[in-house]
Structures are given as C-alpha cells and as structure tokens.
Amino acid sequence: MPEILDIGWVFAGLVLLYFGAEWLVRGSSELAIRFGISPLVVGLTVVAFGTSAPELVVSVKANLDGSGGMAIGNVVGSNICNIALVLGVGAMIFPLVIQRQVIRREMPVLLGATLIFLLMIKDGVIDRLEGGVLFAGVLIYVVTSLVQARKEDPNVSEDLDPEVIKAAKNAGLARVFLNLFLIVIGALLLVVGADRMVVGGENIARFYGVPEAIIGLTLFAFGTSLPELATSVVAAMKRQGDIIVGNAVGSCIFNLLAVVGLAGIVSPLKGEGVTVIHLAVMLVVTVILMPMMLYRMKLDRWEGSLLVTAYLGFTVWLIIV
C-alpha cells in the first residue's frame, strides 16, 4: 500500500535527521575548539544551532513545497516539545539546577523572540521582511554571545561534554579530517532526511485527511526534537543539567529566529492550520517556565512530571480533536 511506503519514508527521515544532527554537532564542535574557539562560544552557537538544524531543513523544505502550515507547525511544536518534553524528561531523571545566566539572558531573549514571532504571525504570514528581521535577531544574539563569552573563562563550558572538549584539544590531523567528514555527511543526511520526511508526511496528510499543520505540530515536531531529547536523557544520566537547559532554551531561540527567519526569507511563510490555541500553548509553556526556574533555581522531578504530562495531554488533544 502507498501509505505504508510513506510511513517508512517518515521514519527513515527521522533516523537520517537524528544522525545528521548528531554528526554535524560533534564534527563542528570539535573542529571549532581545535582551532581556538572557546567551548562556551561553541556551546552557545554551534551546538544550539546544530540541534535546531533538523527544524531548519524540514521547515525550509516544507515551505518551498508550499506547505507553510507544516513549517510553522514544526517550529511551534518543536518549541513546545523542547520545553515540556525535553526539559521535563531531564528533570524527571535528575533535578536540573538552573544557572543565573539562563534567567538573566537566555530566558528574556526567548520570551522576547516568542512575542515578536506571535505579533508577526498574527496576520497568518511571515513575509520576507519579517523573516529578515527575525534572522537579524539571531545574528545579534550570536554576536552578543561571542562578546559575552570573552568575559568568561575560555576553558569552561557548561554546554559541551568534557570528553568532546578533551578530544578536540588533543586532535591531530587525522581527527581534523574526520570532523570535516562528519560535518559534510551530517549536512547531507539532514537534507536527504528532511526531503524524505516532508514527502512522506505530506502524502500521509493527504491520504488520511490530516491537516498539514497537525503533522508539523506532532510528528515533525517530535522527530526534529529527537537530538535535544537524546541529549537530555544522556546528560541527565550523567547529571549534567546545564547541558539540558542550555540546549533546550537555546534551540527554542534558534527555532524562532533562525528557522522561521530563514524560511520566511526564502519564501513568504503562510501558517495555514496553525491556530491561536497552538500559538497560545507555546506562549504559556514559555512563560510558566520562568517561575519554575526561579523557584529554588531548580527544576524538580514533580515539575518535570507536570511538564511531560502537559505535553502528552496537548498531543492527545491534537490527535483526537
């Protein structure tokens, strides 16, 4: 049956996206550190952008194919997934200690980016000018992070695995070529994975009459958030809570500014099927995250359970309504 092949393409795309993002992040992180870029800067830029690469490629591809609702739904759903599921699962495994930098800088940036995005999508379209404004925002964020990083200890990073840093600093020429290979292969896997996932998802949506936006909000959002979720589980097992919080919040920022911005620049982005309720859920989970973080500067297991339950409830609601 044709729909079985389409389901197979979606899952194949998910696998390719996962490994593509994983290899892209590892290769680019080690290469950057090897050539003197501080681990902190790499964590704030390369890792966050790398784990948002699946959302970027899927959303741009979907928009070019005329499925703007799927592209917007992917970003909105991914941010909900990053906050409610990724942070929630991490906190359930091991309580997450929140650093003051996240409260002082990353969370205000995320809240601001969310509000600006909501104002822009109010008319149902992100045009090229608005996309350019959002993308300029991510450039400003990256430059600000670079400037701020100069004030920090260049040998300290809370966003990268110490093993990655050690391997990068001790890398020889063979390791450099290996990282270049990983970057190229990772990028290719992202492109191919996104293409297969979008094609399969579009065909499934048409066959079963499911709105494309719902596919983006659920299947695509979860699939493209797999790098963040995998990082969360591994980091929680190692009790490295800073990696989870920084990666999830940073990826949300990149989703709104870089993913939506670039997709809107390539072609005006129409959010058909993404309703006020979907956008409101994204705003609510973003807003309530701040007081959760401020309470004892920690996300406890009960808070993680609450976030995961909310995410599962939202997903079930999307499917049955």
Image: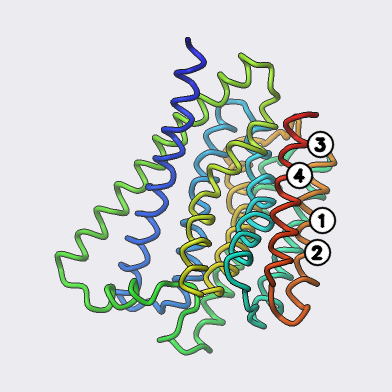
In which quarter of the view is residue 305 placed? Answer: bottom right
Label 3 secondary element: loop
Q: Is residue 73 above or below residue 160?
A: above
Please name the residue shown 44% across and 34% down the image: 13
- Mark closest to the chain's N terminus, 1 or 3: 3
Q: Is residue 310 left or right of residue 83?
A: right
Say few, some or many: other residues with alpha carbon within 10 Å of mark 4 (under 14 / 14 to 19 / 20 or more).
few
**Label 1 vs label 4: CA separation?**
14 Å
- Tell me which amino acid carries mark 3: Thr
**Label 4 vs label 3: CA separation?**
17 Å
The circle on residue 313 is 4
- Tell me which amino acid carries mark 4: Gly
**Label 1 vs label 2: CA separation?**
6 Å
Cβ atoms at labels 1 and 2 below 8 Å apart? yes
Point out the frontmost of discs 1 and 3: 1
The circle on residue 284 is 1
Point out the frontmost of discs 2 and 4: 4
Expressed as whole percent of the image width and height from the top left, the position of residue 276 reads: 85, 41
Q: Is residue 161 left or right of residue 7?
A: left
Point out the frontmost of discs 4 and 3: 4
Q: Is residue 253 left or right of residue 172?
A: right
- Mark closest to the chain's N terminus, 1 or 4: 1
- Tell me which amino acid carries mark 1: Val
